[in-house]
Structure formats: C-alpha cells, structure tokens
Image: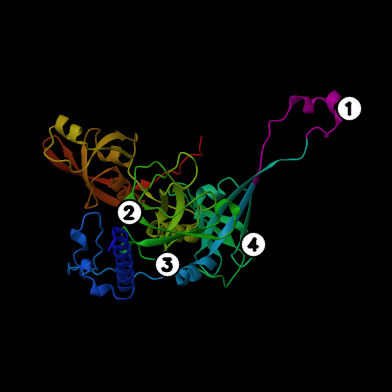
Amino acid sequence: MSFRSLWLIFAQTATVALGVLFVIATLRPEWLPIRDAGDRLPGRVAFREATPAPDDGIKPPASPASYSVAVRRALPAVVHIFTSRELKSPRNPLFDDPVFRQFFGDALEGAPRRATGLGSGVIVTPSGYVITNNHVVEGMDEIDVASNDGKKFKARVVGTDPETDLAVIKLDAEGLPAITLGNLESVQVGDVVLAIGNPFGVGQTVTMGIVSALGRSGLGITTYENLVQTDAAINRGNSGGALVNASGELIGINTAILSPSGGSLGIGFAVPVSTAREVMEQIIATGSVTRGFIGVEARELTPDLVESLKLSSAAGVQIAGLVPNGPADRAGAKVGDILLAIDGKTITNPHSMLETVAKLRPGDTVMMRLRRGPREVDVRLAVSTRPKPGPPR
C-alpha cells in the first residue's frame, strides 16, 4: 500500500472521529470524561455549578423582578413645579429726565423680564399640601404646579425652612393622591431606592439606585444635615422630588448633588423623611419652624486638640464662641469649656449639638454639663428661640 493511500485512510478516520466527538459533545456531553477534568487542562476555563451558601444568619430579601408597583403607588403624588419672578433691572437715570421723556416717553423702558425655575414636589396630604425644596420656591412670585395626570394648579407658599432647605406649598384642591411616609429607622445602606421627579423638564422620570450612605453631614448644603446619600440619578428639576423605597414609601426629599459639572455623577443627597415630617408638621400648624437656641459655637475635639488640651477623652465639643448675653453666656459658660451634655443627652460632635439644641423648646430650662479644667460643672440655662437666618448674600 502506498504512502498516499495510508494518508487518505488516516485523514478520513480522523475526520469521522472528530465528527462523532462533535455530535457527542453536543447531544451527550455527560459521556465525555473531559467535563470533570476540564479545570486541570491548560488553557481551559472550568465552570462549576453554584452550591448553596453556608447559613450565616443573614436572610437577604427576595429581589422583585420589577418596581412597577412601587412606582404606581408613588408617582401620582409627585408633581412638577414651575416658578417665575420679575427681574428688577437698574433704572437708567435718563428715564427721569423730563426733556428725555418728552421725546421718547416710556418706549425705551421695555417690558419687564421674568426669571423662571423648575423643580418637583411631593403631595403629603389629600387636601393639597406639597413639600418641596426651599431653593425651588425661594424669592418666586408665581408658582404653578402640574400633576402627573396633566392637571394644573396655582400654589402659594405656606412656609419655608432654609436651614433644612425645605418648604411647604398649598394647592387649592381636595382629594389629591398623597404619598405614604416611610420609616427612616428601617432604611439600610444597600436598600434599593427610586428617585422620582422632572429632570430638565422632560417629564415625570424614575431612576433607580441604592442607599449609598446614611447620616451624611458637614457638606455645607444645609445647616441641619442628616442626609441620605444615593446613587440614583438626580439632576436639575429633581429638586424637591421623592426618594422612595421598594414599596413606594417616601424616605427622603431629593435636595442636592455633588458634581463639578452640574450633572449626575452618582452622588446625590436627600433630606430624610424624619426631618421632612417634623418641618412640614410645624409649617402646616404655624407657618414656620421654631428651634431652640443656646448661643454656643462648637468646635470638634480632634485628636490634635485633645492632645494639646491634655484631655483624657474626646467626649463632647469645645465651646469656641458664645453669643454675648445669650442663654449660655448668661448661664456662666465660658469659651474653652468642654460641653459634654445638654438636658441629659450626650454631645459627641457639633452636629449632634445642633440637633439636640434644635429639639429643645424655647422657654424651657435645661441643665448643661461642662468640663472646665479637671472638674465637671452643671449650669442651668433658659432656652431661647433660634434667630431666623438672614437673606443670602
């Protein structure tokens, strides 16, 4: 037999064998032992079947395939807010000249110009109370509201709270779809959240993300910061809109983003529902928000400061300043004292001091514990009302 004949027989046999192997691998792969030894063959990626995770006591919630139910519950309560105000242009002195006006009259003054704004809001009662951001309605003389079903309303400002950047407006309507308020204590980092609003005026929009952090403060966004951080997309026009959980319950009012470009970069902040509830209840009841005031400027006890002051611990805050003749000043507190507790509540940092003092009722008398040198002293002071913040400069 010639070499050519042997080669043809070998080639045909190899072809048939490869064909048989292909058919088996396709129809009966379990017949091939290479399946079990695949992770030992060079260049081959082995895929293993998942095995049940060990029981570590953590029971993850079942992830819904869709959040449409939550959206249907919350969406009708989120409204679009359109604002405008008249711009005051400097008056040209020539307009007051009698000779100039004799020839030109009022023709050169032109029509008044108006600035417009855009935002969102959340209906919190069927009687038409809507909560939104203060910066959405601040300084505006016309406020128009459009609901998700196309209805339009005129709105008036009931009250504002610049120190939390919240405001309450009122629609002249009844039987409106009000959102369900959630419980911030049940919110955890990693929970799925939905941001609902009217970004860039494109219309009602829902974005999804998670709770990235809780209790964010020291950002300079508001005076009282205890913000919910999320990576759900928040853009211009979302301000005042709803941040809801997977059940459609309100857990925050979308307020700000951290972005040098002005667009969403996945770092957004919402005022928590607990703060929003306190503010809107006071505004609806009285038209404003009243907070306690003791007249203390606090400084955080950093490790360097603790070392320089030779303190035994970093508990409390240092009094860096006192309002002259303010409650703490009249009570005998001194600059340099370490403020440990107010009304029995431990103070851990300037933010906790602000929160504690804000909840005190003006007119009440409370005890304030101070560390002065090596000893602790208690002073009694009468809480006054926190002054309203001045207009922005």
Amino acid type for the residue under numbered disc 2 = Leu
Tell which circle, 3 or 4, labels the residue nearer the N-terminal end.
Answer: 4
> Gap between marks 2 and 1, in whole Å?
66 Å
Q: Quadrant of the N terminus?
A: bottom left
Pinpoint residue 93: horizontal percent, then vertical percent: 74, 25
Q: According to the image, label 1 marks what residue?
A: 103
Residue 153, disc: 4
Tell which circle, 4 or 1, labels the residue nearer the N-terminal end.
Answer: 1
Amino acid type for the residue under numbered disc 3 = Glu
> Gap between marks 1 and 3, in whole Å?
64 Å
Pinpoint residue 344: horizontal percent, then vertical percent: 21, 53
Tell which circle, 1 or 3, labels the residue nearer the N-terminal end.
Answer: 1
Numbered disc 1: secondary structure:
helix
Near mark 2 (Cα within 10 A), the count class, few <14, some 14-19 or many ≥20, is some
Q: Is residue 223 visible?
A: yes
Q: Check contact, mark 1 vs mark 3: CB within 8 A.
A: no
Q: Which residues are magenta?
A: 85-109
Which residue is at a point 65% across and 63% down the rendered structure image? Answer: 152
Numbered disc 3: secondary structure:
loop
Does 131 lie within the magenta span?
Answer: no
Amino acid type for the residue under numbered disc 1 = Phe
Numbered disc 4: secondary structure:
strand
> Gap between marks 4 and 1, in whole Å?
44 Å
> Gap between marks 3 and 4, in whole Å?
24 Å
Q: According to the image, label 2 marks what residue?
A: 214
Q: Check contact, mark 2 vs mark 1: CB within 8 A.
A: no
Residue 249, disc: 3
Q: Is residue 58 visible?
A: no
Q: Nearer the viewer, mark 1 or mark 3?
A: 3
Q: Check contact, mark 3 vs mark 4: CB within 8 A.
A: no
Near mark 3 (Cα within 10 A), the count class, few <14, some 14-19 or many ≥20, is many
